[in-house]
Amino acid sequence: MSWDGQRPPLGFRAFMVRVRWTQIDWMVMLVALVLLAVGMVFQSAMAEVDAAYLRESPTFASHVKKVVVAVPILLAGLVVRPRWLRRNSYLVYALSIVLLMLVPLIGDVRNNAKRWIELPFGFDLQPSELAKIALVLALARAFYRNRLQTVEDWLGAALLALLPMALVAKQPDLGTALSIAPITLGMAYLAGAKGKTIAGLVLSGALALGFAWHFELIEDYQKRRVDTWLQAFDSEELIADRKGASYHTYLARVAIGNGGWAGQGLGQGIANQTGHLPERGSDSIFAVIAEEGGLLGATWLLGLYLLLVALILRRAGSIRERFSRLVVGGVALVFGSHVFLHCGVMLGLLPLTGLTLPLVSTGGSSLLASFGALGLALGLGTHHEPALDSDSFRP
Amino acid sequence: MIGERTQRLLVLFVLATLVLIGRVAWIQLAEHEIWAEEAARLVHSGRVLPYTRGRILDARGEVLARDVEAYHLTLAYRPFRRGHPLGQVAHARSTLAMRAVGLAEARHNLERWADELANLSPGELREFARGGALSTVSLDVPAVDDGRAESRGSRAADLRFYVRGLLGARLREWRALEDLAEGNPYASYLSLLADVRGLTAAELSDELAERCRDSIDHLGFLAARVELEDEPAGSSGARLEALIGALEASRRAVEGAAASALFEEASGFPAGRVDPETLARAFDLERIRVLLRWDRADLEDWTRRARARWLGTWRDGYALPRLVAELTLDPSSPADADRVISTLAALLSSEAVIEAALDGEPVEWDELDDTAVLSAIDGVFRVDPPELVTDPVMPWHDPELRDSELAGEERWELLAAMDPDGDPEAWQASLVGRRSRDRDRRYALARALVMRWEEQLQLAIGAAFDRMLEGAELDDLGPAGGLRFARGRFDRAEERAAYILRDFGARRRTLASEPSYDVVYLLTRYPERYPGFEAQESRRRERTAAPDERAPLAEHLIGTVSRADVRAIQRQRAAEMRLRELRQMPERDELEELELVALVEAVLLPDEANGVSGIEGFFDRELRGRNGYREQRGLDDVEGAGRTHVSVKEPVDGEDVWLTLEADLQRAAEQVINRPELPVHDPKYDPLWYERPTGAIVLLKPSGEVLAAASAPLFGEDDPPVMERTLRRPTFQPPGSVFKPFVATWALDRARLDPSVTVDCSVMADGTCGYGDVRCWKQWGHGPVDLAAALEGSCNAYFAWLGENLTTADFHGLAHTFGFGEPTGVRTAPPSDDGLGTRGGLAENVSAYVFDEHLRDSLRRRAGNGLGRIEATPMQIGRAMAGLATGALPSLRLVSMVGGEPVPPARPQRLPLSEGALARVRDALVLVTQSESGTAYQALNEEALGFRLAAKTGSADLVGRSARDESGRVRKHTWVAGWAPIDDPELVFVIFVHDTSATSSHGAVYVAQEILTHASVRTWLRGRGLALEEPE
């Protein structure tokens, strides 16, 4: 029987704790709210432009509705009892795996991929988004006692990460699948893995990819996507292929490049005006913001995200309890990797794949996952040790 | 205070952020110009502004030809589908039933189906989206296990859209309805909206039914006023059916085009490039079917239409004519065998190769390794294609033929080897011919050749797909057994599907040309009743109708316009490409701007009028204007804001051309020559000629202005246009006795003819009368005649004698003096002409005599009578007669002013003949009409006309097969030419009657009488100060 020396609370109290409002990292909350507001402003402008050009698109009200639906998840994250979470983290993980396994059976096909489960009230669930948070919990649970000193330690963690990766990749959603890797490696590092080991793993992964490429073990369409990506570094080639495979990349680049120093102004960008850029409100929102806000706006946005990640990491570093510390650190990694991957794709630094920008993109699952992660970071962050003067992530 | 690992991670994030910011800065600052230009290009569009072609007016300013605004009734199917109850119901029903429910079927069930749709509930649609069953009164959609595969989610969204459209719910109402539905999801949309509006469901249902009925009534109202192409005659019901049929055709075209675009996006080649049977058998087209809400029959129908479109519209209608034209663009070097093979084999190859061939640079056939479809299927399917490229699929892949060392003409054997059913000799012959029948022959040969090659290609494609199907695993095949596309091939197609459907749906198709004003009014006054319909402006050339009304006035003389032919389009291909490139540039430098303007002016628009013949052809440069160009930057939102127009260049309209023709005289002349009155009082008239009159009337001012030039017939037997006869000579056309006055004048002046010398025109030993081998027309002869009597009675014997006594040089001189064998002057370019280039149109037969060799006596005897070696057009006769009447040979002219600038008349050439000689002949010609023995007296005397005139008649027998009619009478053409008044000529006339058995005195003179007594002519003469008596 697992027993930490204290009698587990019963009823709601088993799940919830009273929110320690004074301990909440209000800076994190503030930055997150600013990002949410940025998203609201751009989503609203987008809806207005679409209405002006008689385009059918999700309304701003639907975005607000999604935000409202996601708020309870934020609150749940705030009040969840760390111990309950730790004990049930594998259960949450298992549920997320079940959802992922359900996708091929009952998922809705969009853009040639089954990623969504349609829920009542017009809310579509994308289990892969939630799986990332579940993975953070499961890894935190795994690393709770695991210092990643042995191969077995690594094996368990790797299995936890590879299972959702494989299921997500099968949808197919390679982008989300690959976004799991930095989260896993980052958490492993926070849990005490040696930097050299992680570097070795990254290198091995790169070599494996090279091997797969060389021996044509990857799918043609994936190869084409990489080819397209490499070509897209050259502006002339990107323009030449604008009606071909680089269609999306081209439109994103045009939007970003058109922004210039100070941007085109809210709702005045070419991406919004023409409506050609696919997934403007979700997977391509950085291009819209960069165009309408210019270099200044984009830098501010990236700065805000950096600040958010730094604040969450700082808070994680100050938490004494290892599970909570890892979960909060994992949330920072989720946000950080998502931002880097989303913006990297839009900027052509990475091959094209669909990933949302946390708190800013529309999309129910993305907002649910972001709010849930934020709630956890804020809630678990309240259990911190204010005056630790040494590295709490030490082995 | 944070720990070391956190710090390191943070540093990593800081670095990543810096990388991102650096990349943003690079794109937004270093590459900003590139992308800003691309962005501008995305919202940049330009429109060529067509000019208005100049008008053609008569001497008094009556418009004979002009460009007029016209309308076309067009339809954009997407707004119709989304906004009209018929479209909404048909497409909602298609979405439910997963088959293309026709508009005609929907019309017959409109109210019932609309009611069923309105009675769906939000809850039912939600379940339907998840794969649940859905039942309406007349349709049961069963539940499915894998509802997602049937796009149930997006189909449910479509159904919601159509239901909302049918109910006419505004956004606020719909939101209120959705709120109500949350509490009662299984209440029908109809009852929910009724609640929102404060009505009962029955009231709203009645409103819906009324709306449906009205919508059909409105369509019927429109149909009754529109004349569709191929429209069946009949009741208003039949007309409505025809209109609905046209709408259905538009829908098929839109959906078919969208399906083709999706297919091409996924496969890389057009669907029509593959035989429909192979396409349906070997390709998994399930996703296209689901996207377009089709059933399998619709899919098969599309494969057939796509193929027919590729073969008929693209290959035979577009590419092949251009490639064939390309073979003969350089008239100095006809294409050789290699060029023919390389150019036509391109059609069986990849798109890039076809483009190169269309650009006039075909890939050499022995280097042509790409084969259509087969070279493009690598990586398209989940199964690898067999090794096809190395196999000889098409004849030109044969290594032996490629290594052939045949040279020169022998190379044609290669074509024979590649196409055993072909005819290389026919090819060679057709390539050097320039006539239209050679062009037709070339095209026929090319089409037959590519059809045979296409057959071989389709066999090879079929075999290749059979091999792929044999090697495919179950996973590689779709539900119908076709090869599934490789993963990712359809991704982008589906990503763009909505745009493709929207794009094709928004394209306009013409339903009817030039609808009535009622239709234009209906569409502009009640646009909400006719979503998608629009009366679009266009332009057409309008001509003033002739009395005949089957043809415009002065049909031949004014000529025709047509669209640019395929050779002209092929010639301007490079310029067109460059223009497209320049138009796409959002910014242009000064030189590029000038180049754009020059190309906009030079490149013919597809529907631009191009002067082909007559005045339209000859003055095409002046009549043609210069197109303008206007650009739009930015997009147009619902309030019309967000765009700016930049006029790069305004169009310059063409110049007006003022003719010397007088419309009233022209009408009179056309009426008389095409529908002459029968001279029933004359038993010798030729009824055959009056059945189908052939001939011409020319009315001139003595100074050379052409007042009327009418020609008959206007149409051939089966209605093809026939040759104009005032400037042209379709057959050998000697002037006959009309030539005698000119011979006489010359002889008097230059050969010192004594006019009192007589020649005896009596019966000779053989029973005929005449002189030498020339017979006189008068059966018993004229007896002894002097010059005046010979002219008055048109004695052939006298002029045979006179001809014999003139030299060849005399004939040459007199013909030249009176303008025979020379241009009349009507083809004189306006003063603004730069002298560069040639002018088409107003074709004129000039070289009219052969007096350049020594003529034997017999030929000179005949020449004296205007026979044998000499021929003339009515215009030439008219000009010569004007010279005789005035003593100065004018230059004829048809145009008095171009673009406001007068075209000055050429100074008449004074005849180098004495006034005495001229006066003597003129006096004799007065006798022709005023003396009872004159040949034109019967019809053209003063009593008959009300004024006196001088004239000369003439006849010349036709030669050849048509020389005698069924009753054995000699067929001939006859003339009357003269002037009035006698002393101070105001009007010169020429009547030409072709192919008649009656002599001039029994035919042409009556036509002359009819025109000269025509009210218009008399009015004109009075206007010139002539006091006219009323004719008897």
Image: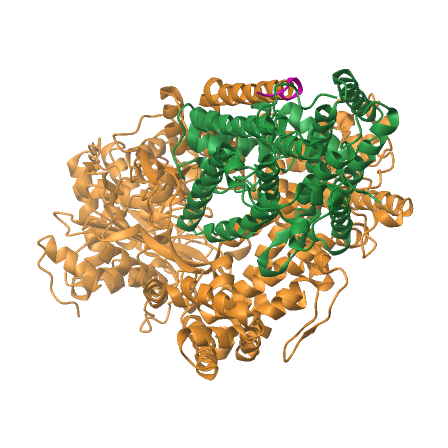
Chain colours: A green, B orange
Along the line of sight, which residue is nearer the eye, A270 or B748?
Answer: A270
* Relative height, residue B108 to residue B484 (above, below): below
Q: Residue at x 62, y 65 (%)?
A: B126
Total number of numbered labels?
Answer: 0
Residue A115: give x, y in percent of width and height.
69, 47
Work out whether residue B832 can be spotted: yes
Is residue B398 visible to us here? Answer: no
Position in image of residue B189 (x %, y %): 52, 72
Q: Is residue B412 magenta?
A: no
Residue B934 shown left or right of residue B174 in the figure: left
Depth order, front residue of A229/B626? A229
Image quarter of the N terminus of chain B: top right
Q: Quadrant of residue B116?
A: bottom right
Which image quarter holds the C terminus of chain B?
bottom left
Q: Position of residue B671 (x, y in %)?
A: 31, 62
Q: Quick one: which residue is furthest to the top in this view? A: A196
Please state the horizontal and vertical placement of residue B678, each as a whole percent of the image. Answer: 34, 70
Looking at the picture, does residue B279 appear above or below residue B219? above
Q: Residue at x 65, y 51 (%)?
A: A13
Vertical order, B853 against B525 (above or below): above
**Residue found 45% across the figure and 35% down from its top:** B856
Q: Is residue B3 a member of the stretch shown in magenta?
A: yes
Task: Pick whichever, B488 or A153, lies toward us.
Answer: A153
Q: Nearer the viewer, residue A185 or B118?
A: A185
Q: Does residue B878 appear left or right of residue A106 in this picture?
A: left
The segment highlighted magenta reads: B1-6
Q: In the picture, residue B110 is in which quadrant?
A: bottom right
Q: Tell which residue pokes out farthest to the right in this image.
A: B470
